[in-house]
Amino acid sequence: MPRSPIKRPPASLDLSKVLCNVDDLPEKLSSASLFGNNAPLEIEIGSGKGLFMTTASAANPKHNFLGIEIMAKYAAHSAGRLLRSRMETPESNLNAIMVSGNAEPLFKDRIEDSSIEAVHVYFPDPWWKKRHRKRRVVNANSIRNISKALRSGGRLHFWTDVLDYFENTVEMIAELAPEFGVPIPEEEAAADHDLDYRTHFERRSRQHQIPVYRVRYQRH
Ligand SMILES: C[S@@+](CC[C@H](N)C(=O)[O-])C[C@H]1O[C@@H](n2cnc3c(N)ncnc32)[C@H](O)[C@@H]1O
């Protein structure tokens, strides 16, 4: 399904507090280096339009959230959404930022072992063709890197509407990272109003009645 067009936020919106380029990031990514505190840090890979980042960070003010989005326009859009939602509740602390860049090298080299509370991957690009599968954001290397980054008891959430991606991921985790234990099915939230979706792609799947496969792991 093609993606809907996206607009950059207006230049008048100062995104400097909610949007970073990889080059501007601290050497190691942690709550201390990014937010100046020691709150649990949750990371989303591939934030798209940023719905999860905005709603999850507002709902969990005692956690910090880092969204990594490879497409600069989408990273800026997500940052704009975050900033606007914070303007509506100026008393809330700023516990979320977007990074414009590739998650893969950041997970490989820039995160302390056993430090992350949760990793969220929602509706990653499917890369349907077998020869393109290595481009998937969940692959053998990223599973090892995510496992290394998560603290004991930390969570990995993985949702997709691509059955083959889902089955492949569950198999790879069982084979390569048994420390994740058994997959825990996650339930669809009741959609009471238009933003009761975890992400935009979840909303699209529901509108078009496309099945979604949802799983969570809790690392040992
Ligand atoms: C299909 S969209 C889903 C967006 C969002 N998670 C949702 O559910 O609405 C996948 C997103 O992952 C981003 N992405 C793909 N590879 C990435 C990577 N290596 N690092 C960070 N983001 C990536 C894409 O640019 C795209 O915005």
Image (cartoon, helix red, strand yellow):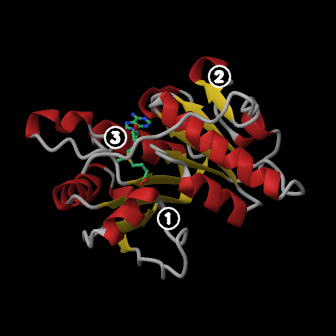
Tag 1: Cα neighbours inside 10 Å, few (<14), some, or many (≥20)?
Answer: some
Looking at mark 1, is its residue's CB closer than 8 Å to ligand 1? Answer: yes
Name which of mark 3 and mark 1 comes first in the sequence: 3
Tag 3: amino acid: Val
Which residue position is annotated with label 2? 27
Tag 3: Cα neighbours inside 10 Å, few (<14), some, or many (≥20)?
Answer: many
Judge from the rendering whether residue 64 lies leftward or rightward of residue 119; answer left or right: right
User: What secondary structure is marked by label 1?
Assistant: loop
Tag 1: amino acid: Arg
Residue 1, how many percent across, how many down?
24, 51
Ligand 1 in which quarter: top left
Which residue position is annotated with label 3? 137
Which quadrant of the view contains residue 215? bottom left
Residue 93, how many percent across, how many down?
83, 52
Q: Residue furthest right?
A: 91
Q: Residue at x 45, y 29 (%)?
A: 102
Of the numbered discs in the image, which one, if any, rests on residue 10? none
Which residue is at the front of the view, 67 or 215?
A: 67
User: What secondary structure is marked by label 2?
Assistant: loop
Residue 141, how many percent across, how many down?
32, 36
Tag 2: amino acid: Glu
State how far apart marks 3 and 2 are (Cα).
Answer: 22 Å
Which residue position is annotated with label 1? 198
Circles 1 and 2 in contact, beta carbons < 8 Å: no
Q: State which mark lies toward you, 3 or 1.
A: 1
Name which of mark 1 and mark 2 comes first in the sequence: 2
State how far apart marks 3 and 1 are (Cα).
Answer: 19 Å
Which residue is at the front of the view, 42 or 74?
A: 74
Q: State which mark lies toward you, 3 or 2.
A: 3
Looking at mark 3, is its residue's CB closer than 8 Å to ligand 1? Answer: yes
